[in-house]
Amino acid sequence: MTQSVPSPGLTLLLAPASMSLLPHLGIRPRGTSHPEIITMAHKAAAFAAQTGKTPLAPFTIDRREPGPNDVQMEILYCGVCHSDLHAARGEWEFIQFPVVPGHEIVGKVTKVGANVKKFKVGDRSAVGCLVDSCRGCGNCGRGLEQYCEKGMVGTYASPDVHFPGKMTYGGYSKSITVDERFVLRLPDKLDLAASAPLLCAGITTYSPLKHWGATKGKKVGIVGLGGLGHMGVKFAHAFGCQTVLFTTSESKVADGKRLGADEVVISKNEAEMAKHANSFDFILNTVAASHNLDAYTNLLRVDGTLCLVGAPEHPHPSPTVWPLLMKRCSIAGSLIGGLPETQEMLDFCGKHNIVSDIEMIPIQKINESYERMLKSDVRYRFVIDMASLQ
Ligand code: NAP
Ligand code: ZN
Ligand code: ZN
């Protein structure tokens, strides 16, 4: 069994340094628990990175024809996650090329298999970060497919059982075929393009906020106002928390407040940071680069938690133990969300009219958008209009 793809389930989101830990976690390459290999395929236009050093460019992929349980959808919009950039630029060394990124996928159903019950042709539909899992382990049984004991199948860069020897290809493409269990329903009233980022940025922030009990009466910090961070601010506000945004960008203060933060702190300003010492119940850190975590553990109160969702190329410097010891606080992590919780999040967004703030781009601007993302110049999620891909 090759070690070159240590964990299909986690290939999208784990930092390389963490990969050496995977054997200890009992995570192994996914077997063929769904041995059916679909040979009927059609071509679809896509954009791919051929290596970590080359820009994304036009590419043609095979998509399977729908099997009995499959939904085929036309991709109308796809959000641009910083994970796409980490993968396409070879920042996560376990990624195999070519990579077709994209896991914030929305569009319309174009074909359904004979057994499909939830969808019919013409319905709005969505696909997030995972397209399969073993479905039989304890975690899958609890709706935590992202933590499947056999490794989830990521929407891109996981071995594709339907095309042996190839990897799954993501949403920077015209169409996708996915088992209906992994396809989500979008509330009708939400704008389609602005809903795309909910499929990763939305669930990745909603899930830990729920898990760590971010509710009214709790003081919650969100670190970084990018794609994930701006959804985190919206959710923390919607859950009734006292919401504080930490940003490195002075130019984002007004937006932070408009999006729902009660207070915005410039994280480079030590005096401003010190005012919040020992006061947070929960801090969700979405930063995409390596940085000093002590700045945030210092702000936790007794039993507080700092949850990391950013997956930077280089590890964070090891944090000082003293705030952890003296306040019994924790540093934790969280990976996207399972299918039931993702549907719950979409329905919550429908009820509360929550979508992402987006900047629409044609696919030809994808490389430029990555450069802007690296400069923290995104307000607050790029979304690709897939009509631009011919
Ligand atoms: P993004 O849109 O690029 O936003 C990241 C934000 O972090 C920036 O806008 C910036 O906000 C802040 N930032 C960037 N560099 C910084 C630095 N050196 N120091 C301090 N702050 C910095 O990225 P994203 O799409 O939200 O993704 C964020 C991270 O989460 C990525 O590493 C991504 O791979 C990861 N991710 C993880 C999961 C998961 O399941 N755990 C899911 C999706 C994404 P300010 O300008 O406000 O400072
Ligand atoms: Zn993502
Ligand atoms: Zn499983």
Image (cartoon, rainbow, N blue to C red):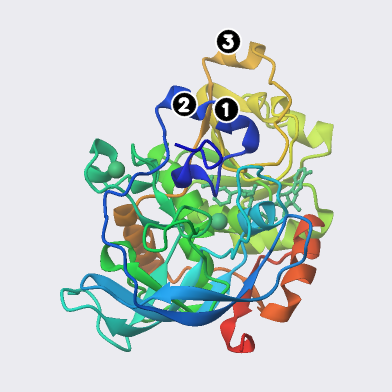
Q: Give the residue at mark 2.
A: 23
Separation (CA) of disc 1 from disc 3: 27 Å
- Image quarter hosting the N terminus: top left
Q: Position of residue 323 (x, y in %)?
A: 63, 16
Q: Give the residue at mark 3.
A: 325
Q: Which residue is at a point 45% across and 51% down the rendered structure image?
A: 206
Report whether 381 appears left or right of 26: right
Report whether 291 appears left or right of 306: right
Q: Which residue is at a point 21% across and 44% down the rendered structure image?
A: 136
Dot 3: element: helix
Rendered image: mark on residue 295: none
The answer to whether residue 30 is above or below residue 34 is above
Q: Nearer the viewer, residue 377 or 170?
A: 170
Dot 3 or dot 2, earlier in sequence: 2
Dot 2: element: helix
Separation (CA) of disc 3 from disc 2: 29 Å
Query: How many discs appear?
Result: 3
Dot 1 or dot 3, earlier in sequence: 1
Q: How packed is label 1: few (under 14 Cα within 10 Å), some, or many (20 or more)? A: few
